[in-house]
């Protein structure tokens, strides 16, 4: 389904308002997007014709199943791009979100997946990680330093040798996914659960090498909310307990 950039913005706004307030009215959308009521009405009618929302004058607006799926795809594009700008290019969050808003409407799925893969590569590669990002930020602000590059390479080789030695000795400490705190990220090392639950975990995209971030834990309902490959997912603590991860700094 082809949507204009404007209609995608409206659909994204509707989804976000529902997440925040559980109900959407035209005035909420107008306030969120800083547009007039007539513009909102025209957009809502267009989205309803495409079977993306349920809309009638003076009634609460809801998303259809197709509309919810489409909105989540739009939001994923935005978040993947924003993550790339902040985590790889060391761009400030506000500027990253602004650029993501402009680019999210035209990026293809194939290119989007490459963004995801590159962010993961930077996070797990021995030459990458937070130190690499900090070094790139320093380079952009103050220029390159050949001596610093040589030291960085030496330190990276030393750290890699030390980590390989620990792994060969079986002394590397891994965690279970359910042991991570909100905001922590980890690289999936192995899936220890077998059977249909193990297959379910793999179907969620939780595979060895993938980077997963814990967003929220809800002890009262035994659920963990995670983010992986730009998707927001929920899984039980029992499922998460079967995922072994290496915590990323």
Image (spheres, grey):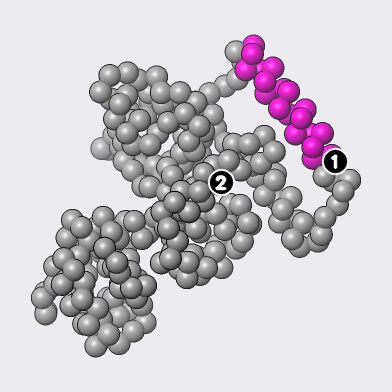
Q: Choose between 26 and 108: the one closer to the eye.
A: 108
Determine the secondary structure under disc 1. Answer: helix
Q: Is residue 249 left or right of residue 114?
A: right
Q: Is residue 44 left or right of residue 114?
A: left
**Which mark lies nearer to you, 1 or 2?**
2
Determine the secondary structure under disc 2. Answer: helix
Q: Residue 229, located in which quarter of the rendered image?
A: top left
Q: Is residue 163 magenta?
A: yes
Please tell me whether residue 10 is drawn above or below residue 243 in the rendered image: below
Q: Is residue 179 magenta?
A: no
Q: Is residue 45 left or right of residue 249?
A: left
Taking the image as drawn, is residue 2 in sight? yes
Q: Position of residue 146 (x, y in %)?
A: 87, 48
Highlighted range, magenta: 151-169
Residue at left offset 28%, top offset 76%: 29
Magenta stretch, overall SS: helix
Q: Position of residue 122 (x, y in %)?
A: 61, 43
Residue at left offset 33%, top offset 30%: 201
In what quadrant of the picture does the C terminus appear? top right
Mark-to-mark CA distance, 1 and 2:
24 Å
* Mark with earlier residue (1, 2): 2
Q: Is residue 143 left or right of residue 131?
A: right
**Pointer 2: what residue?**
118
Q: Choose between 110 and 79: the one closer to the eye.
A: 110
Q: Choose between 1 and 154: the one closer to the eye.
A: 1
**Pointer 1: what residue?**
150
Please tell me whether residue 143 is drawn above or below residue 207 in the rendered image: below
Q: Position of residue 77 (x, y in %)?
A: 42, 57
Callout 1 crowding tier (Cα within 10 Å): few <14, some 14–19, many ≥20: few
């Amino acid at each position: 389904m082809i949507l204009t950039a404007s209609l995608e913005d409206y659909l994204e706004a509707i989804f976000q308002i529902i997440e925040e307030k559980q109900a959407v009215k035209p005035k909420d959308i107008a306030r969120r997007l800083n547009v007039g009521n007539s513009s909102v009405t025209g957009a809502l009618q267009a989205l309803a014709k495409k079977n993306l929302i349920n809309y009638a004058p003076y009634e609460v607006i809801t998303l259809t199943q197709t509309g919810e799926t489409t909105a989540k795809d739009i939001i994923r594009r935005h978040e993947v791009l924003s993550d790339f700008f902040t985590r790889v290019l060391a761009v400030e969050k506000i500027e990253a979100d602004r650029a993501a808003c402009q680019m999210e409407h035209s990026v293809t799925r194939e290119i989007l997946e490459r963004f995801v893969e590159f962010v993961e590569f930077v996070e797990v590669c021995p030459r990458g990680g937070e130190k690499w990002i900090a070094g790139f930020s320093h380079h952009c602000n103050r220029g390159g330093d050949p001596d610093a590059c040589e030291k960085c390479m030496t330190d990276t080789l030393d750290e890699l040798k030390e980590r390989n030695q620990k792994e060969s000795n079986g002394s590397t400490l891994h965690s279970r996914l359910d042991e991570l705190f909100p905001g922590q990220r980890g690289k999936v090392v192995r899936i220890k659960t077998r059977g249909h639950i193990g297959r379910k975990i793999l179907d969620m995209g939780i595979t060895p090498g993938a980077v997963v971030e814990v967003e929220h834990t809800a002890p009262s309902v035994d659920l963990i909310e995670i983010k992986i490959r730009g998707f927001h997912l929920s899984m039980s603590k029992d499922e998460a307990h079967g995922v072994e991860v290496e915590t990323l700094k």
